[in-house]
Image (spheres, rainbow, N blue to C red):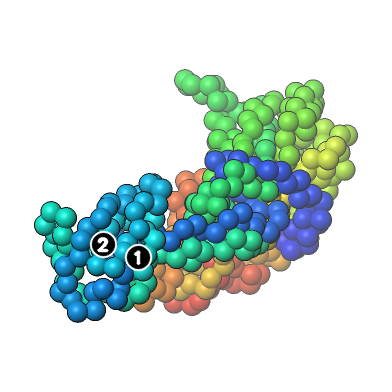
């Protein structure tokens, strides 16, 4: 058996970072910048009003209340209009260019106007409610360093400086293949011995949820030619492939035969429960993860090995799920067996913000519902586990 960390390091070493390209902003959510992003121009690019009100010369309002002559109106989006001279004001809307001559905005709530006159009720100071050029962003400033994951706010900032594209690592295209004679996705009754293919929709969804592009490679029977055809399609179309099933020690595990023939594979027994069997290798230039067939093992294996590797391929600097200490609200016991156990748990926070966990249900590797109900995995190192009220490390799945 090899340790989780050894398997992870070997996998990461074999997974190349996808070559960056200019991505349109609309396609870049969740992608990672490949270079520092520099502002093309300053924001705001002109002095503008933060309020609806009147643009004035602050000095004119020193003896407030004072009455000024309204000489024009400035709306957002209009080119600069009439200037403000001594004793004058311009009616102004939020976002409009501050007129020449004006150095302060008085909010409309502090004024009363009648015809072409406005009475300013409070004295203004120079700069009141004026947004200055470059206050948010300076031209040439590094907005985001290389390695930044682009969220909605980042995309807004890029739009604000007129960037049409951003140099980022593309979304990985990840092929998902199920294997096994027993699998069906057809509607209707199951034939004797058949089960429904749950791994493929689950793994496709895990890929999509992480922001990558799932590619459905279908379900192949335990047949060398069928598995070969599916893997070859995946190698041609994808940046990485996930298979499930056929990697343990059963008799009809043709996944092994095919991958060994096509690629350079490792067949590992990892010191974890669930998800002990794991195949990993490179076919052509495409990393292939042979995940175990049992649905819980498949999902845990994705979390422990495939997800961090795919994050690395897509340029992420932080690869792993957050791990935090939690209070075990019930005993999470286990037997010593040389493995780390990942126990499906529901994590909640108490009034003090402390994390608490309880088992989400049965812990066998075919009990997918308990995995679905879990939002974290309690990490139990080799030993006896923890008693109720003891602290346990948990890996958050959300
Ligand atoms: P295997 O590794 O192929 O021996 O499969 C281990 C267990 O996982 C068996 O009970 C399979 O029927 C089950 N299994 C394999 N693939 C899937 C799948 N795609 N969906 C649900 N269960 C599966
Ligand atoms: Mg099988």
Image point (46%, 58%), residue name: 46
Nearer to the camera, 377 or 196: 377
Image coordinates of residue 392 in percent, x first then y, are 53, 72
Cα–Cα span, label 1 and label 2: 8 Å
Side of 7 where 142 appears, left or right? left
Quarter the N terminus occupies: bottom right
Relative to 228, say whether 101 is above or below: below
Q: Which residue is mark 2?
A: 89
Q: Which residue is mark 1?
A: 102
Q: Is residue 200 visible?
A: yes
Q: Quadrant of residue 200?
A: top right
Image coordinates of residue 14 in percent, x first then y, are 82, 51
Relative to 192, say whether 271 is above or below: below
Query: Residue furthest toward the front?
Result: 86
Image point (49%, 77%), residue name: 390
The answer to whether mark 1 is within 8 Å of ligand 1 is: no
Q: Quadrant of residue 128?
A: bottom left
Nearer to the camera, 359 or 106: 106
Q: Which mark is residue 220?
A: none
Nearer to the camera, 309 or 260: 309
Q: Is residue 268 visible?
A: no
Residues at circles 1 and 2 in contact by the CB criterion of under 8 Å: yes
């Amino acid at each position: 058996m090899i340790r989780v960390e050894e398997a992870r390091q070997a996998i990461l070493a074999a997974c190349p970072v996808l070559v960056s390209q200019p991505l349109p902003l609309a396609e870049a959510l969740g992608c990672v910048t490949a270079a520092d992003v520099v502002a093309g121009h300053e924001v705001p690019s002109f002095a503008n009003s933060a309020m609806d009100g009147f643009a004035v010369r602050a000095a004119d309002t020193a003896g407030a209340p004072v009455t000024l002559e309204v000489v024009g109106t400035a709306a957002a989006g209009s080119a600069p209009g009439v200037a403000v001279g001594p004793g004058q004001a311009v009616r102004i809307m939020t976002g409009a260019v501050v007129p020449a001559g004006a150095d302060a905005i008085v909010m409309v709530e502090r004024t009363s106007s009648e015809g072409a006159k406005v009475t300013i009720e409070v004295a203004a100071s120079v700069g009141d409610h004026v947004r200055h050029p470059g206050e948010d962003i300076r031209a040439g400033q590094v907005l985001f360093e290389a390695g930044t994951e682009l969220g909605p706010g980042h995309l807004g900032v890029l739009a604000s400086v007129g960037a049409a594209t951003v140099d980022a690592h593309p979304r990985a295209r990840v092929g998902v293949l199920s294997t096994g004679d027993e699998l069906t996705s057809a509607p209707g009754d199951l034939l004797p011995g058949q089960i429904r293919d749950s791994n493929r929709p689950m793994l496709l969804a895990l890929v999509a949820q992480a922001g990558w592009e799932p590619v459905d490679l279908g379900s192949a029977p335990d047949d060398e030619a069928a598995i070969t055809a599916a893997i070859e399609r995946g190698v041609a179309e994808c940046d990485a492939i996930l298979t499930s099933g056929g990697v343990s020690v059963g008799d009809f595990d043709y996944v092994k035969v095919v991958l060994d023939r096509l690629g350079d594979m490792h067949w590992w027994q990892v010191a974890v429960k669930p998800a002990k069997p794991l195949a990993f290798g490179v076919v052509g230039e495409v990393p292939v993860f042979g995940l175990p067939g049992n649905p819980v093992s498949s999902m845990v294996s994705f979390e422990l090995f495939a997800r961090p590797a795919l994050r690395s391929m897509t340029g992420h600097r932080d690869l792993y799920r957050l791990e935090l200490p939690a209070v075990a609200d019930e005993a999470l016991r286990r037997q010593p067996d040389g493995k780390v156990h990942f126990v499906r748990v529901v994590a909640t926070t108490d009034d003090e913000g402390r994390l608490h966990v309880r088992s989400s249900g049965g812990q066998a590797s075919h009990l997918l519902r308990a995995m679905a109900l879990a939002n974290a995995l309690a990490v139990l190192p080799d030993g006896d586990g923890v008693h109720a009220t003891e602290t346990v490390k948990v890996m958050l799945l959300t």
